[in-house]
């Protein structure tokens, strides 16, 4: 496994090292300062600690909607990062995106302030709750959002008002947006378990949900085997149940690698019948596909829960009508319904609650329609996610031309999976790949890797038309304008990626409004 720890003034920045002992409590943190507080995962934790009465401050390179929200809650947020910001702090929290030469890290080390990874804070919050983690290369945000929604709607007593730490917002009724962080009064905490840096192996939840274990983040893990082994360790850390999707071959390998006692407390779920020759001894829940209702856009399926899993003394068949499309979301909903049932929610009530879920923000989110061209935004940034998104798009819009504005996320992921990205994007009719969103990486460390890398990998793929269906345009503003010029009435344009490509939705809609001829042909 790739070594990621770094020493700064005798402080080891290692996301896999646990900073707290079993007796540490939230009240022991003192004043807590978050470096990069506007990040999706960091802002959630900051808000949760603030809600629990901890004095919280933070800093970020620039202001954003999340830093504005935190400021409105009464949290002091500094714009820019400066050594003076950590003065008086007892604990400084960093994420894996923070580099060792960050001035606040250096200052905290020199002043003897406790420096901890964001995963240490999440693990600490879990220690006082019945925790459910959701891990996997994709599906984490939707599954954890669905579970939180089910508990909010159908939970009673201790299950009502759960805490949740989700790295994205949730679509609410009437276009409202619910933040992904909430410190509830109930005794359950639902949390995304980010596997990118290995830190999720610190968590010891009651229930561990594994949506898949498809290879990703090989910049950290080095090999697919190392990546899967991390999930084996994570599954072994659950104290009550592990809920795992065995439609994914890698997740099946994880399940078959577990010790017999750990496997026996697993619940596997799948759209396929259980393989009689399978080595695992887990409980098994099957998903019977019915497909998407073309008029309503709902995903229809039935979950079959056998007796003996703790949900009653007889088999259950639970028809589900899900508002978010795609077979991948049927799997995500099944995982959330199983986890809710394990926690004590009546399975029928869990299904009813799931039917009112509108989706996590930036997951097949319709942003608007101008001149009969629909603009949809999605967070997909792994080839499997993109393939699932475009399959769902074909089912939702069977007669439309599907156009994609794709922004790759991370140079390393682009290099590792260039061919897989090309194959997934080939499910669309027209694709423009923009410049790579670097996140924690630097372009100089990946010479020759960029949008053109995926376009080159697409050469020779079967596609109609064969030529001209995919191109590289470095600047996303230019790419958006080009896409509008190509659009016609009835088309659907998807902005796809985990970076800032979502900002192009308004650009597209305004350009479509101005470009009268393009959409009236």
Image (cartoon, rainbow, N blue to C red):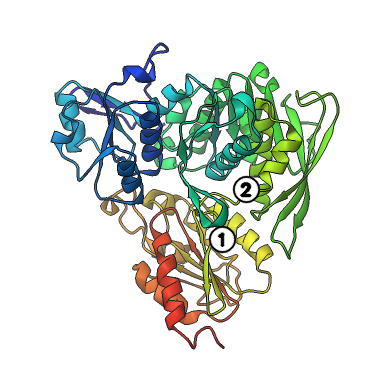
Residue 247 visible within the image? no
Tell me which residue sits at (66%, 48%) in the image. Answer: 356
**Farthest top residue in view:** 23
Pinpoint residue 31: horizontal percent, then vertical percent: 26, 25
Mark 1: few/some/many CA within 10 Å (<14, 14-19, 20+): many
In front: label 2 or label 1 = 2
- Residue 438 image position (x, y, % from top left): 34, 52
Callout 1 secondary element: helix
In the rendered image, residue 2, in percent from the top left (x then y), is placed at: 38, 33
Q: Nearer the viewer, residue 352 or 326?
A: 352
Relative to residue 414, is residue 334 drawn left or right? right
Residue 223 screen position, x and y as percent: 47, 37
Give the vertical position of 91 relative to 247 (above or below).
Answer: above
447 or 408: which is nearer to us? 408
Is 513 displayed left or right of 89 in the figure? Answer: right
Indicate the quadrant containing the N terminus: top left, top right, bottom left or bottom right: top left
**Quarter that holds the C terminus:** bottom right
Q: Which residue lies furthest to the right in this view?
A: 314
Distance (Cα) linking label 2 and label 1: 31 Å
- Residue at 37 percent of width and 29 percent of height: 49
Answer whether labels 2 and 1 touch (C-beta < 8 Å): no
Position of 51 compared to 372: left or right? left
**Residue picked out by circle 2:** 357
User: The residue tagged with tag 2: helix, strand or loop?
Assistant: loop
Residue bearing the label numbered 1: 423
**Corner quadrant of residue 202:** top left
């Amino acid at each position: 496994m790739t070594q990621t720890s770094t020493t700064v003034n005798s402080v080891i920045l290692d996301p896999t090292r646990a900073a707290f002992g079993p007796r540490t409590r939230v009240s022991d943190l003192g004043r807590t300062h978050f470096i990069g507080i506007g990040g999706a995962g960091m802002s959630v934790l900051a808000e949760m600690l603030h809600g629990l009465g901890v004095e919280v401050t933070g800093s970020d390179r620039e202001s954003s909607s999340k830093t504005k929200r935190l400021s409105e809650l009464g949290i002091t947020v500094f714009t820019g990062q400066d050594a003076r910001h950590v003065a008086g702090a007892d604990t400084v929290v960093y994420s894996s995106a923070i580099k060792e030469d960050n001035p606040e890290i250096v200052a905290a080390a020199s002043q003897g302030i406790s420096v901890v990874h964001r995963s240490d804070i999440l693990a600490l919050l879990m220690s006082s709750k019945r925790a459910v983690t959701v891990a996997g290369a994709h599906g984490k945000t939707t599954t954890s959002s669905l579970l939180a929604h089910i508990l909010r709607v159908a939970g009673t007593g201790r299950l009502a008002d759960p805490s949740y730490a989700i790295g994205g917002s949730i679509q609410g009724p009437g276009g409202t947006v619910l933040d992904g962080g909430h410190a509830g009064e109930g005794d359950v905490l639902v949390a995304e378990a980010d596997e990118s840096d290995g830190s999720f192996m610190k968590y010891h939840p009651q229930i561990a949900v594994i949506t898949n274990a498809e290879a990703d983040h090989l910049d950290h893990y080095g090999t697919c085997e190392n990546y899967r082994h991390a999930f084996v360790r994570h599954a072994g850390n659950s104290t009550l149940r592990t809920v795992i999707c065995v439609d994914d071959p890698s997740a099946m390998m994880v399940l078959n690698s577990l010790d017999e006692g750990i496997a026996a407390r697993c619940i596997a779920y799948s759209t396929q019948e259980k393989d009689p020759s399978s080595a695992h001894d887990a409980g098994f829940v099957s998903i019977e596909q019915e497909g998407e209702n073309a008029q309503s856009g709902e995903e229809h399926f039935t979950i079959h829960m056998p007796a003996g899993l703790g949900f009653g003394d007889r088999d259950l068949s639970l028809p589900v009508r899900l508002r978010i499309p795609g077979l991948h979301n049927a799997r995500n909903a099944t995982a959330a319904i199983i986890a809710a049932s394990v926690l004590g929610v009546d399975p029928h009530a869990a299904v009813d609650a799931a039917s009112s879920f509108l989706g996590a923000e930036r997951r097949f989110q319709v942003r608007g329609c101008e001149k009969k061209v629909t603009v949809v935004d999605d967070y997909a940034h792994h080839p499997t996610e993109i393939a699932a998104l475009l399959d769902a798009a074909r089912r939702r819009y069977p007669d439309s031309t599907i156009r994609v504005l794709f922004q790759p996320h991370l140079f390393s992921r682009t290099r590792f999976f260039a061919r897989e990205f090309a194959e997934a994007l080939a499910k669309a009719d027209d694709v423009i790949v923009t410049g790579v969103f670097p996140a924690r990486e630097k372009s100089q460390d990946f010479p020759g890797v960029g949008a053109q890398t995926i376009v080159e990998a697409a050469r020779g793929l079967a596609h109609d038309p064969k030529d001209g269906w995919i191109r590289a345009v470095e600047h996303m503003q230019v790419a958006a304008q080009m896409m509008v010029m190509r659009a016609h009435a009835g088309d659907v344009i998807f902005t796809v990626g985990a970076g800032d490509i979502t900002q192009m939705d308004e650009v597209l809609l305004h350009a479509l409004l101005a470009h009268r001829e393009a959409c009236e042909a």
